[in-house]
């Protein structure tokens, strides 16, 4: 149901000055960071601060359009291409508010990856302003979440309101420079992640490959977590050699690189709470091997409280679900 609130009385110049001040502060504090999200260096400005200011700037009509209760089922949804609310960012927000949306996205990504993600949205959906934003809960309290959706995007900023879930809940990312890509995936911003995963496969011996390489992948959106008693496909990372584990760590670093350090750290915290990387299985799939080149386009990491499913055929789709306690997972596609 829509989130109900009292009308905002800060109309006219006061509101505009508030917005411009927040935007200026955001631009001043988003400094250039190292490429990887594993540095641990905090970003000076929190995007959740911009979420709160954006919320305060909304008119009653805007709130009726994009604001929903914390427990609304849409908050936990993730899909490859969906409208969390029907109007686009350009249809809902004025120019100042659109700048704040840009600032929020910039805040939950790293400086290296922010322009790449903008390129992906331009390629896949016509640009950020053609995507969709919703707000759940009340940003003036400890429980709120900003969600961005559209083609090949579900991203969140929640100020760690959801204590059980990394990234505030399940996320999705993908890219399609063209719908059916060439085997080398030219121009795909995420293909390097598959190259890093395939470097692990190339380092496996024959027996290990027989365990890791399977015929048919699970459905790409099968991301419900199984918990510690689950049965996971592929080879357990705990069974790999030290050198092979280092390659897996490089994969994880690459997977987390697009996201701000606090979210990357939270994801690793949840992984460690469930036995660490040793409890996660890595699998590769023969199906949809573009070019039949043995560079596996589909692969999956899965453990008690993690699913990271990468599908590179005919273009990249990636589904991510990481929590601290799988029993409390309430995500759904």
Image: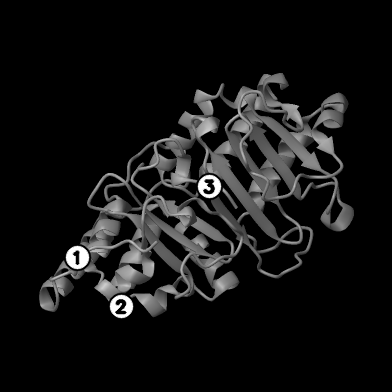
Percent from the top left, x then y, of residue 286? 85, 45
Residue 6's disc is: 1
Is residue 288 rendered to the left or right of residue 43?
Answer: right
* In the rendered image, the vertical position of residue 81 relative to residue 112, given as above or below: below
Quarter of the image that includes the N terminus: bottom left
Distance CA(mark 2)–CA(mark 3) = 29 Å
Ranked by sequence position, the earlier of labels 3 and 1 is 1
Image: 143 above or below 23: above
- Circles 3 and 1: CB distance less than 8 Å? no
Q: Is residue 125 left or right of residue 110?
A: right
> Quadrant of residue 196 in the image?
top right
Residue 109 appears anywhere in the view: no
Q: Say which of 82 and 286 sits in front.
A: 82
Which label belongs to residue 94? 2
* Label 1: few (<14), some (14–19) or many (≥20) C-alpha neighbours in 10 Å: few
The earlier-in-sequence mark between 2 and 3 is 2
Q: Is residue 212 visible?
A: yes
Residue 175's disc number = none
The quadrant holding residue 148 is bottom left
- Toward the viewer: 84 or 17? 84
Q: Residue at x 36, y 41 (%)?
A: 160
Element at badge 1?
A: loop
Mark 2 is surrounded, within 10 Å at the Cα level, by few (under 14), some (14 to 19) or many (20 or more) other residues, namely few
Q: Position of residue 121 (x, y in %)?
A: 53, 68
- Alpha-carbon distance for marks 2 and 1? 21 Å
Residue identifier under label 3: 170
- Considering the numbered disc 2 on the image, is that residue within a helix, a strand or a loop? loop
For the point 39% across and 40% down, the residue is 262
Q: Image point 62% across, 39% down: which residue?
A: 307
Which residue: 87% across, 27% down? 206
Whole-Å distance between the Cαs marked 3 and 1?
31 Å
């Amino acid at each position: 149901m829509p989130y109900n609130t009292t009308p905002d009385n800060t109309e006219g110049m006061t509101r505009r000055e508030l917005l411009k001040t927040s935007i200026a502060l955001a631009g001043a504090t988003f400094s250039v960071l190292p490429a990887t999200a594993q540095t641990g260096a905090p970003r000076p400005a929190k995007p959740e601060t911009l979420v709160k200011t954006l919320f305060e700037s909304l008119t009653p009509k805007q709130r009726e359009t994009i604001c929903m209760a914390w427990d609304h089922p849409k908050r936990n949804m993730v899909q490859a291409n969906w409208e969390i609310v029907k109007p686009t960012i350009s249809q809902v927000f004025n120019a100042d508010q659109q700048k704040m949306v840009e600032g929020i996205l910039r805040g939950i990504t790293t400086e290296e990856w922010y322009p790449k993600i903008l390129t992906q949205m331009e390629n896949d959906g016509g640009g950020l302003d053609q995507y969709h934003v919703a707000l759940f809960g009340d940003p003036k309290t400890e429980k709120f979440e900003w969600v961005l959706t559209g083609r090949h995007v579900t991203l969140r900023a929640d100020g760690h309101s959801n204590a059980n879930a990394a990234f505030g809940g399940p996320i999705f990312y993908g890219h399609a420079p063209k719908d059916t890509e060439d085997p080398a995936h030219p121009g795909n911003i995420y293909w390097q992640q598959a190259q890093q995963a395939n470097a692990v496969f190339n380092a496996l011996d024959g027996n290990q490959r027989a365990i890791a390489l399977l015929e048919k992948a699970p459905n790409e959106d099968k991301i419900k977590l199984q918990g510690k008693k689950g049965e996971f496909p592929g080879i357990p990372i705990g069974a790999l050699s030290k050198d092979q584990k280092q390659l897996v760590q490089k994969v994880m670093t690459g997977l987390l690189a697009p996201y701000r350090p606090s979210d990357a750290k939270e994801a690793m915290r949840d992984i460690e709470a469930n036995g660490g990387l040793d409890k996660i299985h890595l699998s590769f799939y023969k199906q949809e091997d573009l070019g039949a080149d043995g560079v596996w386009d589909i692969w999956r990491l899965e453990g008690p409280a993690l699913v990271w499913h990468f599908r590179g055929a005919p273009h990249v789709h990636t589904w991510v679900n990481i929590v601290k306690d799988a029993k409390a997972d309430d995500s759904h596609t």
